[in-house]
Amino acid sequence: GTTDDEKVRYALRRERLGQQWFRKQLVAAYDGRCAVSDCGVSEALEAAHIENYSGPKSQVASNGILLRRDLHSLFDAHLISFEPVCGEYRLCGSYLLDKTDYVSFAGATLRQPNECQWRPNTVFLEAHRIEFDRSEKKREKAGLLPY
């Protein structure tokens, strides 16, 4: 039979392939450009999960956004999120970023793919936004100062 080691290796390989497929889908959906900054440098772009990665079912384009690596990090840390404004999504940033270059992205439109099935799932975006608000309250309560 297969050893535990082999099982783990196989699972990791499958996960990596899933990740590659996820990235490929998003690169195609967003025409190889960041959905916020419009950066087209492929090495600087990452496939961001909106809802935390939880196996193959989370590797669908509607659970992802193609983002520049730094914006992906801020998104994962709930330092930026997106809020619905007049039928589109706009970037909202934490007060912690007020004195940084990132303030220029405040209110930026989240560019969405033309194909409906590639577009970010609004339920996931809403959940991310709720988490952002919760994190923001915690940061204020802890008295964290802007960068």
Image: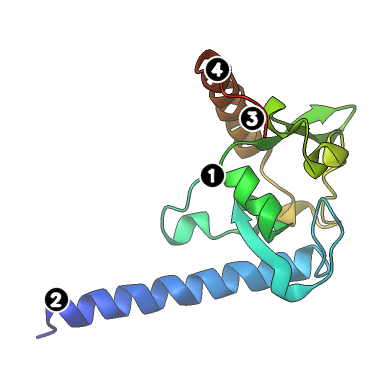
Classify mark 2: helix, strand or loop: helix
- Residue type at the position of mark 2: Asp
Mark with earlier residue (4, 1): 1
Mark 3 residue crowding within 10 angstroms, few (<14) / some (14–19) / many (20+): some
| Residue positioned 57% across, 45% down in the render | 76
Q: Is residue 103 above or below residue 133?
A: below
* Residue 23 in the figure: left or right of residue 13: right
Are dots 3 and 2 in contact, CB under 8 Å?
A: no
Mark with earlier residue (3, 1): 1
Q: CA distance from mark 3 to mark 2?
A: 39 Å
Residue placed under numbered mark 4 in the picture: 143
- Residue type at the position of mark 4: Gly
Q: Is residue 38 visible?
A: yes
Question: Which one is in front in this view, the residue at disc 2 or the one at disc 4?
Answer: 4
Residue placed under numbered mark 2 in the picture: 4
Mark 2 residue crowding within 10 angstroms, few (<14) / some (14–19) / many (20+): few
Quarter of the image that includes the N terminus: bottom left
* Residue 3 in the figure: left or right of residue 131: left
Viewer-closest of 50 and 115: 50
